[in-house]
């Protein structure tokens, strides 16, 4: 544990939360975002995001009306942007679970500043992801066929199909993430309830906070529940994207069938998820003046995680390339040469640049402490990770074993519209979240303040109380 | 066996080193007999024992680098033990010589006449050839040696006087070291284990070999701690909290091993491509099936249910039993990786398997114990040491 130790000289870790906060100032700072009058910029933002979300639903309506012919998919590329977007969005969610579960088990107390909104991001990303498998055949009235429900036609989904495993993996993931997020919210909801000035807020937060009183017994149970949920969520960090990777890897298609796919997809998911947490975190800390909570130190640590996971992804690219050559299998060899130098070479090199080259800048402390650079890099990483899935899907399908059926896949305006629209939905949900719920876990942040340490002594000459 | 009060060095370092060396010498003599009686069996048995220990030693190197990189405090009191294990790299390099001598018995691709009639092997011959194989092996050992020596030296130098710059240096070495480690370990796994069946390939293979090695290094650290504790050394410094954390890591990396093993198996089973399934097929013939199932249950299922509880991780008798068991499973794992190339009809245990294991284990324990007794047994001047000894699991 990195509690302060007077003997450790300048190894003494810097406080996790800056600005000499007190318990009260933390509450004030975080609650004021939710309680103050809605800032105009929020209306502008949700107007934009909401319009895009409407675009998404409108286009889905058109898709259902017209059929998937409006997309660019055709033989041989029967899986286009829909699966790319699905994998992209599921991946984004993984940082939230890593932060809330694995970093909790690793006693990484800096996670408290970012876990709440990262977890919220997980939920919204999974919602966006779930749209794509539901619409991808254009017949949403048959979407329930994905579930193994008894029906009059005595049809069952193929239990050996990874697409069915996806349904279980992602729905479990969503359920557990939602529970975890909600359990974490309860003490903060109670704080909002206690501060509520209007009847409506009192009732709504009163219902949501489930009668939380903050008693010793409640905390004891709460912490045990939190630990157990963290333990249960930990395997999900690995399992969900591993299952997603099997969508490709169980096939016999060169470029898809390779044994490193499960851990490689997990690393990529955490990589892209952290990039998204960083993008949103940088914007949020700026707009809501949360620089004391999401400090440069937090961004620094997140950069390091991105550096590590980015290199894991790079390792997987290299490994695949080497084994394709080493296999002596001409189809494997062709697929990888085709990726790097074929018609999709542009996408491949965007992927390599954004995912392997750009993160190398994280080696430099200067970069890790420059908000502007981090912001730009986090967006580049997300672009790169989207392209990674695109490269996997399009390059392998467009040129498989039979050259006579080769084709070049291009998306249509509807593919683009639905993808852009999914960002609209994601941002709308996120904006609603930061407007109505505390985006920083107040109770957890208070737990990492120096005052929370039982051995804390107030420095001489200072007095507690709010700033 | 006790500790010197101020230097924290092992006084009268018991008979461990001498006994281990004796065992190593006896094992070596027996192995030499085995070599003359049945050289293919000897070389394969030797490779099993050798990669068992090599992965363990490399696991310790990874452990040390990881603790530096994440700035872990709880594990500082354990660091010297891990550092002593990892400093066995020079011994491992020396012990690699018999593998080179036995190349023709071990590696089918090293026979020029076999390559000449096999177009797949011909296609790979730019990589799988004797000269390049030796060059690569030298590079791997050079990297591991330089990394482990630099980290060990910096840590020992720190004992006399703490220096922030040195701590930062160890961090830097670890950061670059991780990249080198990942590449060298992967390719070493490809070269020394995967190329036993030169037609077969799997991209996750390097991760698989690494995961088993890391697990065995963590249980080895646990065993050394328990061994010293029984003799009253570091019994107060290394607390149940440390065992609890070691238990958590053991559990986590056991599951990680299973995850990697299962990923490889599932994907190959599902795609059902003959070039790939042949490797598992060879491990499903005759008694190999029993060994495969032993790995599934012994390396994962049973330990999973035993180790998942909190009391099991804080119970030293249980932790010791599980550590010994998992080490045995690590050996079974490597036996399962190597031996099917020799005994294609079914597992056939030989006394040479035991002799080579005795030889290498004896020498490794002797060497590691010597390193452990050479310097303070904990990084005495690390300012965070007190904190490391006092930590508690919340």
Image (cartoon, coloured by chain):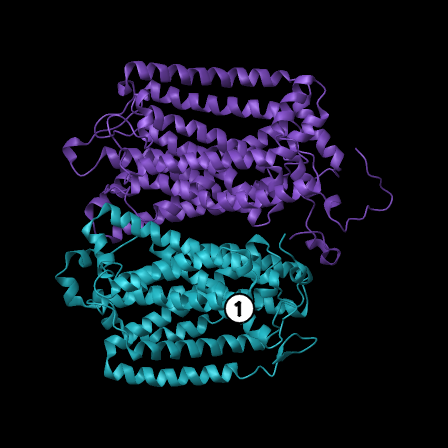
- The answer to which image quadrant residue A261 occupies is top left
Camera-side residue of B186 and A110 = A110
Q: Residues within 10 Å of mark 1 (few under 14, many from 20)?
A: few
Vertical position of residue A459 compared to residue B310: above or below: above
Q: Is residue A191 left or right of residue B136?
A: right
Camera-side residue of B366 and A198 = A198
| Residue A287: image location, x then y, percent | 63, 26
User: What color does chain B have in the rendering?
Assistant: cyan
Camera-side residue of B381 and B349 = B349
Chain identity for the colour purple used in the image: A
- The answer to which image quadrant residue B215 occupies is bottom left
Camera-side residue of B136 and B44 = B44
Q: Chain of mark 1?
A: B
Q: Is residue A405 left or right of residue A281?
A: left
Q: Is residue B184 visible?
A: no
Q: Which residue is mark 1?
A: B317
| Residue B377: image location, x then y, percent | 60, 72
| Residue B12: image location, x then y, percent | 60, 84
- The image quadrant where one finds the C terminus of chain A is top right
Q: Is residue A230 left or right of residue B158?
A: left
């Amino acid at each position: 544990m990195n509690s302060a130790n007077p003997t450790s000289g300048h190894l003494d870790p810097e406080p996790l939360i800056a600005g000499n906060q007190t318990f009260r100032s933390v509450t004030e700072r975080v609650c004021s975002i939710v309680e103050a009058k809605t800032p105009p910029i929020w209306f502008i933002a949700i107007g934009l995001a909401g319009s895009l979300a409407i675009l998404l639903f409108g286009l889905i309506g058109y898709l259902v009306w017209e059929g998937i012919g409006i997309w660019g998919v055709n033989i041989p590329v029967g899986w286009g942007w829909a699966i790319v977007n699905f994998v992209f969005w599921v991946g984004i969610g993984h940082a939230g679970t890593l932060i809330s579960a694995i970093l909790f088990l690793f006693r990484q107390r800096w996670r408290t500043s970012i876990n709440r909104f990262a977890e919220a991001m997980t939920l919204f990303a999974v919602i966006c992801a779930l749209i794509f498998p539901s619409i991808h055949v254009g017949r949403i009235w048959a979407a329930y066929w994905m579930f193994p429900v008894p029906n009059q036609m005595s049809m069952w989904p193929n239990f050996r199909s990874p697409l069915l495993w996806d349904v279980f993996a992602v729905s479990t993931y969503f359920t557990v993430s939602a529970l975890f997020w909600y359990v974490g919210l309860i003490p903060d909801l109670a704080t909002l309830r206690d501060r509520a000035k209007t009847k409506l807020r009192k009732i709504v937060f009163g219902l949501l906070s489930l009668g939380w009183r903050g008693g010793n017994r409640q905390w004891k149970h709460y912490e045990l529940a939190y630990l157990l949920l963290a333990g249960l969520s930990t395997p999900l960090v690995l399992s969900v994207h591993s299952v997603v990777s099997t969508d490709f890897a169980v096939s016999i298609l060169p470029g898809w069938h390779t044994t490193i796919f499960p851990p490689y997809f997990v690393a990529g998911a955490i990589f892209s998820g952290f990039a998204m947490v960083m993008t949103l975190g940088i914007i949020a800390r700026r707009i809501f003046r949360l620089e004391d909570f999401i400090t440069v130190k937090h961004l620094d640590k997140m950069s390091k995680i991105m550096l590590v996971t980015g290199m894991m992804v790079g390792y997987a690219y290299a490994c695949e390339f080497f084994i394709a050559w080493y296999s002596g299998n001409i189809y494997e060899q062709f697929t990888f040469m085709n990726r790097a130098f074929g018609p999709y070479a542009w996408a491949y090199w965007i992927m390599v640049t954004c995912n392997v080259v750009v993160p190398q800048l994280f080696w430099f402390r200067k970069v890790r402490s420059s908000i502007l650079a981090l912001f730009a890099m986090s967006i580049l990483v997300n672009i790169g990770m989207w392209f990674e899935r695109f490269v996997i899907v399009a390059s392998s399908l467009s040129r498989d074993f039979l050259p006579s059926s080769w084709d070049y896949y291009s998306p249509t305006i509807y593919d683009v519209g639905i993808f852009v629209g999914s960002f609209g939905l994601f941002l709308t949900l996120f904006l609603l979240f930061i407007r109505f719920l505390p985006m920083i876990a107040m109770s957890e942040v208070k737990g990492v303040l120096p005052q929370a340490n039982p051995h804390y002594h107030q420095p001489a000459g200072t007095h507690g109380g709010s700033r | 066996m006790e500790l010197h009060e101020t230097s924290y060095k092992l006084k009268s370092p018991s008979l461990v080193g001498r006994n281990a060396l004796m065992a190593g010498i006896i094992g070596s003599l027996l192995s030499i007999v085995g070599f003359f009686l049945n050289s293919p069996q000897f070389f394969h048995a030797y490779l099993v024992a050798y990669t068992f220990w090599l992965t363990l030693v490399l696991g310790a190197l990874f452990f040390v680098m990881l603790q530096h990189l994440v700035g872990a405090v709880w594990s500082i009191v354990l660091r010297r033990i891990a550092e002593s294990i990892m400093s066995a790299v020079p011994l491992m390099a020396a012990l690699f010589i018999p593998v080179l001598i036995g190349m023709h018995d071990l590696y089918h691709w090293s026979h020029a006449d076999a390559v000449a009639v096999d177009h797949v092997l011909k296609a790979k011959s730019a990589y799988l050839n004797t000269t390049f194989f030796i060059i690569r092996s030298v590079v791997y050992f050079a990297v591991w040696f330089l990394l482990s020596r630099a980290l060990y030296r910096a840590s020992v130098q720190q004992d006399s006087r703490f220096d922030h710059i040195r701590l930062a240096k160890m961090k830097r070495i670890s950061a670059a070291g991780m990249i080198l480690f990942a590449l060298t370990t992967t390719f070493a796994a490809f070269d020394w284990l995967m190329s036993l069946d030169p037609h077969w390939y799997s991209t996750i293979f390097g991760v698989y070999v690494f995961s088993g090695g890391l697990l065995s290094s963590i249980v080895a650290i646990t065993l050394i701690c328990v061994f010293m504790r029984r003799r009253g050394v570091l019994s107060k410094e290394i607390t149940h909290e440390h065992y609890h954390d070691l238990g958590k890591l053991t559990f986590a990396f056991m599951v990680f091993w299973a995850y990697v093993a299962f990923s490889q198996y599932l994907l190959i089973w599902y795609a059902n491509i003959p070039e790939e399934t042949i490797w598992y097929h060879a491990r499903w013939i005759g008694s190999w099936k029993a060994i495969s199932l032993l790995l599934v249950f012994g390396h994962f299922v049973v330990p999973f249910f035993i180790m998942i509880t909190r009391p099991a991780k804080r119970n030293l008798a249980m932790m010791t039993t599980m550590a010994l068991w998992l080490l045995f499973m690590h050996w079974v794992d490597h036996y399962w990786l190597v031996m099917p190339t020799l005994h294609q009809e079914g597992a056939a245990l030989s006394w040479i398997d035991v002799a080579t294991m005795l030889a290498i284990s004896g020498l490794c324990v002797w060497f590691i114990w010597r390193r452990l007794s050479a310097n303070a047994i904990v990084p005495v001047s690390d300012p965070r040491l007190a904190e490391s000894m006092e930590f508690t699991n919340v």
